[in-house]
Amino acid sequence: MPARINVNGALGPPESAAISPLDRGFLFGDSVYETLRTYGGRLFLQREHLDRLRRSAEQLGIPYDNAPVDVEREIGRTIAEAALPEAALRVLVSRGPGPIGYDPEGCGPPSVVIYARPCPEIPGAWVREGVDVAIVRVTRNARSALDPAIKSSNLLNNFLAWREARRLGAYEPILLNEREHLAEGASSNLFLVRSNRLLTPPLEEGLLEGITRGLVLDLARRGGIETSEEALRADDLRGADEAFLTSTLKGVLPVRRCDGWPIQHGRPGPITLRILDLFEERIQAETKAGSAPDSIRK
Ligand code: PDD
């Protein structure tokens, strides 16, 4: 399958892509990114992703507008060139190359890297049966450190959590914050169902404001499901009626077990199935009608 990488407008196969070893994205993880995907060949919620990319850059003081290329235009070119049936896209904006050391003076312009690859498939069995999660010892970064609301490519902490989960035989780690409240997965947001209410940690707990999270909250509210963003503890997950993960690449993914113990009956429950249906309907509506989705931040 033809993957393509675009570095500051130079577009080609991954083998020929090059970036300076003095790029601060490489040296410090001093960059921000987005993961997008297509459904039916069309980018899903592109506007929301591009807005968040800009916000992340602004929060780190990366001068997004000084990028040598137009990010949206290059995304379009890269997708067209890759010509994949369904593409997953990583769009990265770094502070750019500069003198080694923390002082960003004399550094830049920002580097823009866009990687288009075949969209990884989530096996149907995972959606039907659910996946396993583990609450890990690695905690989510405090908001007073590298705020998890910033989608930065400085992902070592997430990687450590992911590695711990894999050692425990789980698919996705669930990270707590410093108050021992549930935060999110290494690359996903977390939802629980308790007494027919859909619960998810609020942004104040220190997590990424997932685009899929926002869409799911919106779909649930419009669908008459009561939702609440509230502080939750590990035992709320272990004792939940239902649980699922959300992300751009995972979609809505039911959770079967936590720390080796089944969530209720260890099968996706009725509210999870309803959310899966609503999510699927939204994708279908966008794909078939060929119209842009409503903004999810109403
Ligand atoms: N991950 N939380 C974290 C820490 C994430 O990295 C992600 C996304 C999410 C879900 O956000 P969204 O619904 O906007 O994709 C939550 C992407 C997919 C990634 O790392 O590639």
Image: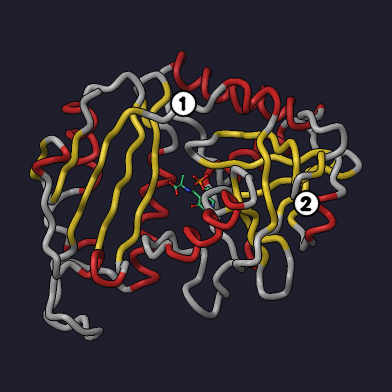
Asked where in the image residue 36 lies, by quadrant, the reply is top left
The quarter of the rendered structure image containing the N terminus is: top left
286 to 204, vertically: above or below: above
Q: Residue at x 31, y 73 (%)?
A: 61
- The image shows residue 25 at horizontal and vertical percentages of 25, 65
13 lies left or right of 256: left
Q: Residue at x 39, y 44 (%)?
A: 35
The mark closer to the camera, 2 or 1, is 1
The quarter of the rendered structure image containing the C terminus is: top right
Mark 1 sits on what residue? 121
How many angstroms separate mark 2 from mark 1 (CA)?
30 Å
- The image shows residue 90 at horizontal and vertical percentages of 32, 44
Nearer the observer, 46 or 28: 28
Q: Which disc is residue 228 wearing? A: 2
- The image shows residue 29 at horizontal and vertical percentages of 32, 67
Within 10 Å of the Cα at label 1, are there few (<14), some (14-19), or many (20+) other Cα atoms? few
220 lies left or right of 63: right
Q: Residue at x 49, y 65 (%)?
A: 157
Nearer the observer, 265 or 78: 265
Badge 2 marks a residue whose secondary structure is strand
Q: Mark 1 is on which residue type?
A: Glu
Badge 1 marks a residue whose secondary structure is loop
